Amino acid sequence: MSFADEKLGASFFCSRYCEDRSNLHTIFPTLASQLAYQYSAFQKELLQVLRADPDAAQQSLCFQMEKLIVGPLEATQIHTLIIIDGIDECKDKKPTSAILSILSCYVDRIPNVKFFISGQCEQLHWRFQLPVPWPTREICEVYEIEVHSVIKDAKLFLRTQLPKIQSQIYLPTLWTQDGWFNYASMFARFIESEGLTGRVYQTDCLLQCVEEQGIDILYTWVLEQAFHKIDLGDEKFHSHFKSVVGAVLLMFNPLQIRALASLLGVSDILTILHSLHPLLILGSRADSVQVFHGSFPDFLMDPERCKDKRFFINPSIHHQEILFSCLNLMKGGLKKNICNLDNYVSLDKIEDLPTHPKAKIGDALEYACRFWAKHLARVPASGHNTKEVCEAVDGFFTTCLLSWIETLTIMGHLHAAPHAINNVQQWYISVSCE
């Protein structure tokens, strides 16, 4: 059976901008869940594992791989394909070597399964060259793909997205290199949003400028267009603009539009987000807001590249803004027995418990409870607002501590509490050392 004939059983797409998708310990449980959904035989085997050890998903990576993936696959002899994309996006120190080391220990037990793993780091190439029991391995380097093939694909993409553009569109050769095919997509989104789909000369000029000056010029164009129709004296919009963009770039889990507006207290969020349509992934209000390509945050947070102060995002400033938003939301939203549960009820006796957080807590408050301390950890201890930050954190522990712990418990995130306390302790130590 060829690689193309394999049925996709499960996939995990890593992202450094999402807490759950940048954590190595969520990869194998997620893959197991998808395989169970795809194959009933796998599901039966997995349920036996979980009945014997309900905390299997919380164990070590090796344990997860053996019990959640290898065991059920070995028992069912399923032919399938598993994809782990962008492994270098995980935040662990050596995510690629960790995952590949584990796979190398077990892959010979499941010869019917093919793994497709992508990444940008040399660790991927190095690990595959080791004399480990990989039954069959093949490495495909992006730069080894024939240039004319990439150009053909990129031109086809642009013609499909922009049908009014003439067939002989100029395409910079730079766009055939690593990562630049994404820029072709971004460029198409920008041209379409600005109504330039029929102006071939302007399109070619823009492409020429991008080749000569790099992708930064495209980012600058989009940002300038976002401000183009806004009064230069509208300080409120400018402030909201940076707050929203800073949050989208720096939050540990992407939020839906309504939840993001609730957390930040920004009413004109739709106007701001839609003005950045070419650079963000936006759907309906029920969809989370994410950046289209990882190079965009790199551009905005680098003062050497983003020279216009209207657009520059200073991470320390915006982590502090998000921290204050989290603390204010918790101060106003947390309360004893937030889900109105019966007195003395045991959580494991509540059949519809997973529905309570959505109805009574909401995504914005859930985010604040889970991640406020992680934002605190990224606020400089020697900043000019250090006293204000200390007062806000002290106020939180004085008025919200018990309600916060109770809410984390209901949401199933109580494990976040000790990590948060440790972050707070370390931050206060750094303050006292200044």
Image: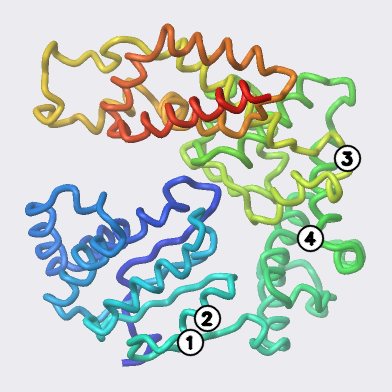
Question: In the picture, residue 271 is in which quadrant?
Answer: top right
Extreme residue in the front direction = 433
Circle 2 crowding by C-alpha within 10 Å: few under 14, some 14–19, many from 20: few
Q: Amino acid at mark 1?
A: Gln
> Which label's residue is closer to the chain start, 2 or 3?
2
Q: Nearer the viewer, mark 2 or mark 3?
A: 2
Q: Residue at x 37, y 31 (%)?
A: 418
Tell me the element at label 4: loop
Which residue position holds label 3?
A: 308
* Above or below, comparing residue 162 to residue 374 in the picture: below
Image side of residue 288 versus residue 217, left or right: left
Q: Nearer the viewer, mark 3 or mark 1?
A: 1
Identify the colour scheme used: rainbow
Q: Is residue 253 visible?
A: yes
Circle 1 crowding by C-alpha within 10 Å: few under 14, some 14–19, many from 20: few
Q: Nearer the viewer, mark 4 or mark 1?
A: 1
Residues under numbered marks 2 and 1 in contact, where contact means CB atoms less than 8 Å apart: yes
> Which label's residue is closer to the chain start, 4 or 2?
2
> Which label's residue is closer to the chain start, 4 or 1?
1
Q: Amino acid at mark 3?
A: Asp
Q: Residue at x 42, y 13 (%)?
A: 333
Which residue position holds label 1?
A: 129
